[in-house]
Image (cartoon, grey):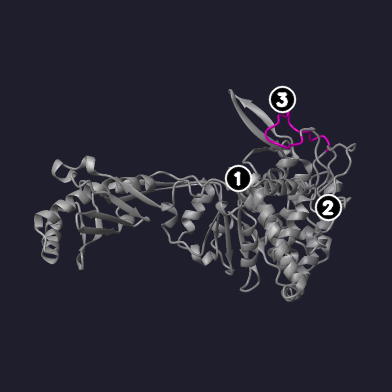
């Protein structure tokens, strides 16, 4: 695009007769003609200070020319340029000096417009959707098997056998719309597929909502535009690439914003002044790493997703790689474009609504370690993300607070059941970390503590025991029990209580899972909300906010294999909605395996 500015009105009378104009070509070049002399100016994109106008200037007349780099605001440099150009072109110095004066007046409006453009914050608008894209996005969001659709679609774009990781990562990226988004760290050995998973999840998100870097320096985050990361996904390819920026990332994740005071020179006075830079959040953070030892401060702020590295998983990936070379693989690749388009449209249609959990006070969570304070926040945020994703299947309610209207949706029992299943996978611990002998001791201890709790009518966690009592109950020698019990204490399956005034040490069992399961288990979660745990009073009636929302007031049927326990608060009179493939959702979604459609 060519822009023509006429500076003749700003010139003095002797210069106004020729009425020169500057022609801006692109973002970095301008042309200026005066008489037989033609000027070309380059470097405008870098001249963003109101106190200087440093450019590369070329003047030509016929076959003669002169070129130099100078600051047009420096009188000494203009005089030197005019003297050299006049000698080269065969013109008088007064003529070239007059040309430079006219050129400065012509370039000033261009420079001022460029400075205003840089200083004005530019909000990244969501892409406009066509009618077909909007229909596809709404169909996805309203699918009663939305959870299974996500798992199947992530597999369709190239990720095999990572259903739970794919769903947790998708929900975490959806949580960017919350006030306290989740953060995800994908951990595996080299070539296991961590980058494949992250890239697949990012491809399902709108391009305007993700920022992807390979590495970051220590101070780079502080100087990003103030609103450039707000409610977006910040993805960094390797955790090693952000070690220098780890401090800034931790602050941004915890506090939701960054501020830094930086010292620089005032261009007008030359004195050192302090300027404040601010970066607004919240931001969803996604990292990958091959490291085993990770910064603990960064780790405990993230959900850690571990890639399956089994031989069976490797065989499944190799089978998919071979299949991609067949005609069916070509068909799948073409269809994946529609999958990506539908998910990007769906994510664009999601609104940053508030989420209210009417069952929050009935939830339980382990509390034996300080770190669990942050894990509990992750658990609650996971529930909120699930509810937010299903906003098109919920009534949107309105709360009036001091004359201001706040739109919100509510969490259901099914959301909590699904979050519990996912929490076991990403917040839980596997008993594989225990040697077989210690694991058998834990199983026996679990049975014995349960019997003691039933006999005394106390809670399991309140049952205290000594080594002697446990040695007699389990029939172990003192040496055997000491080894296994110390290991259970170190791994925080058992808590040791200090003795006072010479009394014996006592212990209590923290483990409340299934000692026979090899799957990861999170301690302290309530599998079901008690029937008397009724939702808190709303005091408001559902209000329509947007096209096509169901305002029936009843909750939806279960959403399939990962939807959690059946929902007793849902209407049984409505016909069961079916998945995109025509099948009804699983009858017992709380125990159904992770399936695909």
Circle 2 Cα neighbour tier, 10 Å, few/some/many (<14 / 14–19 / ≥20): some
Lower position in the chain sequence, tag 3 or tag 2: 2
Q: Nearer the viewer, residue 146 or 475?
A: 146
- Which residue has dot 2 on it? 450
- Which residue has dot 3 on it? 539
Q: Indicate which label's residue lies in the foreground, 1 or 2.
A: 1
Q: Position of residue 291 (x, y in %)?
A: 57, 69
Helix, strand or loop under label 1: helix
Helix, strand or loop under label 3: loop
Is 224 above or below relative to 216? Answer: above
Image quadrant holding the C terminus, namely: bottom right
Which residue corresponds to the image point at 24% horizontal and 53% vertical from the top-left? 53
Helix, strand or loop under label 2: helix
Which residue corresponds to the image point at 67% horizontal and 64% vertical from the top-left? 306
Lower position in the chain sequence, tag 1 or tag 2: 1
State if disc 2 and disc 3 touch (CB < 8 Å): no
Circle 3 Cα neighbour tier, 10 Å, few/some/many (<14 / 14–19 / ≥20): few
Q: Position of residue 492 (x, y in %)?
A: 68, 58
Is residue 436 shown left or right of residue 178?
A: right
Is residue 88 shown left or right of residue 149?
A: left
In this rendering, does residue 499 appear at all? Answer: no
> Which range of residues does the magenta coloring cover?
531-550
- Which residue has dot 1 on it? 177
């Amino acid at each position: 695009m060519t822009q023509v500015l006429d500076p003749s009105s700003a010139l003095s009378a002797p210069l106004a007769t020729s009425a020169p104009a500057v022609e801006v070509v692109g973002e970095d070049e301008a042309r200026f003609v005066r008489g037989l002399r033609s000027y070309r100016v380059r470097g405008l994109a870098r001249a963003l200070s109101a106190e200087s106008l440093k450019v590369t200037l070329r003047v030509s007349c016929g076959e003669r020319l002169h070129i130099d780099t100078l600051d047009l605001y420096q009188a000494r440099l203009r005089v030197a340029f005019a003297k050299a150009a006049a000698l080269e072109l065969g013109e008088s110095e007064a003529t070239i000096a007059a040309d430079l004066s006219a050129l400065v007046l012509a370039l000033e409006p261009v420079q001022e417009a460029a400075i205003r453009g840089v200083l004005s914050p530019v909000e990244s608008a969501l892409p406009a959707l066509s009618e077909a894209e909007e229909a596809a996005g709404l169909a996805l969001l309203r699918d009663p098997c939305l959870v299974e659709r996500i798992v199947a679609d992530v597999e369709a774009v190239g990720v095999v056998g990572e259903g739970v990781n794919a769903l947790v990562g998708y929900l975490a990226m959806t949580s960017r719309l919350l006030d306290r988004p989740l953060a995800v760290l994908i951990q595996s050995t080299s070539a296991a597929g961590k980058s494949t998973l992250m890239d697949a999840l990012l491809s399902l998100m709108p391009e305007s909502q993700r920022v992807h870097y390979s590495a970051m320096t220590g101070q780079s985050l502080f100087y990003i535009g103030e609103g450039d990361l707000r409610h977006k996904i910040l993805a960094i390819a390797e955790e090693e690439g952000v070690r220098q920026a780890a401090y800034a990332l931790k602050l941004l994740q915890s506090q939701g914003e960054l501020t830094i005071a930086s010292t620089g020179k005032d261009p007008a006075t030359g004195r050192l002044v302090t300027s404040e830079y601010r970066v607004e959040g919240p931001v969803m953070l996604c990292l990958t790493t091959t490291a085993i030892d990770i910064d603990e401060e960064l780790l405990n702020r993230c959900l850690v997703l571990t890639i399956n590295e089994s031989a069976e998983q490797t065989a499944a990936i190799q089978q998919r790689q071979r299949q991609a070379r067949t005609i069916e693989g070509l068909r799948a690749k073409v269809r994946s474009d529609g999958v990506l388009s539908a998910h990007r449209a769906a994510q664009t249609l999601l609104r940053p609504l508030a989420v209210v959990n009417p069952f929050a006070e009935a939830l339980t969570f382990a509390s034996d370690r300080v770190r669990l304070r942050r894990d509990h926040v992750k658990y609650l945020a996971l529930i909120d993300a699930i509810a937010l994703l299903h906003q098109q299947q919920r009534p949107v309610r309105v709360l009036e607070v001091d004359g201001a209207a706040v739109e919100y949706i509510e969490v259901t029992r099914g959301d909590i059941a699904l979050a519990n299943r996912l929490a076991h996978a990403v917040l839980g611990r596997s008993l594989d970390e225990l040697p077989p002998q210690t694991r058998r001791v834990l199983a026996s201890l679990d049975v014995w503590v349960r019997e003691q709790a039933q006999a005394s009518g106390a809670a399991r966690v309140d049952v205290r025991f000594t080594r002697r009592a446990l040695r007699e109950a389990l029939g172990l020698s003192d040496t055997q029990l000491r080894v296994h019990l110390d290991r259970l204490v170190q791994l925080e399956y058992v808590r040791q209580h200090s003795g006072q005034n010479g009394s014996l040490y006592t212990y209590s069992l923290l483990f409340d899972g299934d000692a026979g399961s090899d799957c990861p288990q999170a301690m302290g979660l309530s599998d079901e909300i008690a029937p008397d745990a009724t939702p808190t009073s709303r005091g408001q009636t559902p209000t329509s906010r947007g096209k096509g929302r169901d305002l029936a007031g009843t909750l939806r049927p279960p959403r399939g294999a990962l939807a959690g326990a059946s929902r007793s608060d849902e209407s049984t009179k409505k016909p069961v909605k079916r998945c995109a493939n025509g099948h009804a959702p699983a009858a017992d979604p709380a125990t159904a395996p992770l399936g695909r459609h």
